[in-house]
Structures are given as C-alpha cells and as structure tokens.
Image (spheres, grey):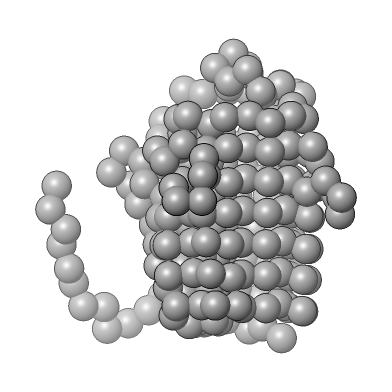
Amino acid sequence: DQPVYETIFQSARPFDRSIAITGDNNSASTLASQFSFIKKVSDNSVAIRPGVWRLTEPLVVPMNVSLEIPAGVTMIADPNALIVVHGSTRFLGNASNPVVLKAINDKSHWKGIVVFHGANDRSSWRNVVIKNTTMPEYLGWTTTGAVTLHNGQIKMENVLIEGSIAEDALNIISADILLKQVRIRQTRSDAFDCDFCNGSAESVSFIDIGGDGLDISGTNIS
C-alpha cells in the first residue's frame, strides 16, 4: 500500500498487449443493465443514449467491447467516476452539439478516461469537450494522464481538453495518431505527453499550461 520509487536508467516501448485493470466479468448486456443510459448495440458494442446523464461510479467497458458516444450526450461525472474502455471508442459529436464530458461543477474534478486498445482497435473522436479531470485511479491502479489512450490507431478532430489537474492532460502511448484542431488549456501540469507514437498533429494549441506543452519520447511526429 506504500509507494515505491525506483530510478529508471533505460526506456523501452510498453508492451503492445492491452492490459485489463479489472476482471472480464462485464459484458455488453451487463453494462446495459447496470447503467440506464447505456444501450447494447451488439455483443461487441455499447452506446450511450443521447441526453444529459450523471455518472456516479466507474464505467468499465471490458475487452473486445467498443464504446460509442453520439452527438447530444452530456455526461456529468462525480469525483470518483471515470471511464475505462478495453477496446475501440467512437465519440462523435458535431459542431453545434459536441460530446461533453465534465465534472459536476467548475470546482470539482472527475477521474477521466483510459482507453486500452488491442492491436486492431481504433478510436475516433470528433467535436468532443472534456473538462475538469484529474488522474484516473481505480482499485489501486492509477496513471498520470487524465485522458490516456494506449496502442491502436487514434484520430482526434476538434477536441478540447480543459481544466486538468493531472500530471498530463492527454497521454497517448504506442499508437498511430492523427490530431487536428486539438486544444488543451488551463492545466496544472503538462498538456500533451506522446510516447512511442507515430503520426501527425495539425493546428494543436496549448493555452495557459502549467508545465510542458508537448512532451515526447520515442516518438516520430510531424
């Protein structure tokens, strides 16, 4: 239960295997029965229904089940709430009706989003607003990025991440990335940490950042 600190002299690419932080007891059907705002699309896919919803507990999507959030969804999260997905994600708002994921008020913070991709998984986020996040933590597991995506293929377009107090507002690891019009602002520490990735970032802005704007290691990015 106590932190252990160790100096790391060499760095290496993280394993390409997705790492489940909980058991695989959940399924698309059990998620739909547990959360009133979730509907089962198929055995391998769930979606959040359009509307304004309150997330009061962790939402953990198991391996090989994708999560879709369409335009018209606003998710208001309690301090202990977070979203963990062990598969693909599609957060698809539009310019006039973005997907909004935020804390219950401007003085509160929720525990953010973690996406573990399998080798063939991908995430596409368009017109998404994520506000007032801190580091994800669940059953003793934690990571530094308020919004963390690992492995797979990631496309983000017109995404705003605002008000993070985590070590990294956005952390992408071991992925192929395409970012356009991504804005990160008002962070306590770093904005975008990009490790062992390949791809490009266009029209990405960092505004009122407490630490690094862009922090990369082992990455080929234009």
Taking the spot 43% from the left edge, 55% from the top edge, the residue there is 134
Rendered location of residue 202, percent (x, y): 77, 79
Rendered location of residue 79, percent (x, y): 41, 41
* Left or right of 31 in this view: 5: left
Q: Is residue 122 visible?
A: no
In the picture shown, does residue 168 fall above or below 43? below
Taking the spot 32% from the left edge, 82% from the top edge, the residue there is 10
Residue, far left: 2
- Which of the two residues, 135 or 220, is positioned nearer the viewer here? 135
Taking the spot 14% from the left edge, 47% from the top edge, the residue there is 1
Rendered location of residue 104, percent (x, y): 52, 40
Q: Which quadrant does the C terminus fall into?
A: bottom right
- Which of the two residues, 172 or 164, is positioned nearer the viewer here? 164
In the picture shown, does residue 70 fall above or below 39? below
* Left or right of 13 in this view: 38: right
* Left or right of 200 in this view: 209: left
Total marks drawn?
0
- Which of the two residues, 199 or 102, is positioned nearer the viewer here? 102
In the picture shown, does residue 57 fall above or below 29? below
Q: Is residue 37 visible?
A: yes
Taking the spot 81% from the left edge, 41% from the top edge, the residue there is 71
Rendered location of residue 135, percent (x, y): 40, 55
Residue 76 falls in which quadrant of the image? Answer: top right
In the picture shown, does residue 65 fall above or below 211? above
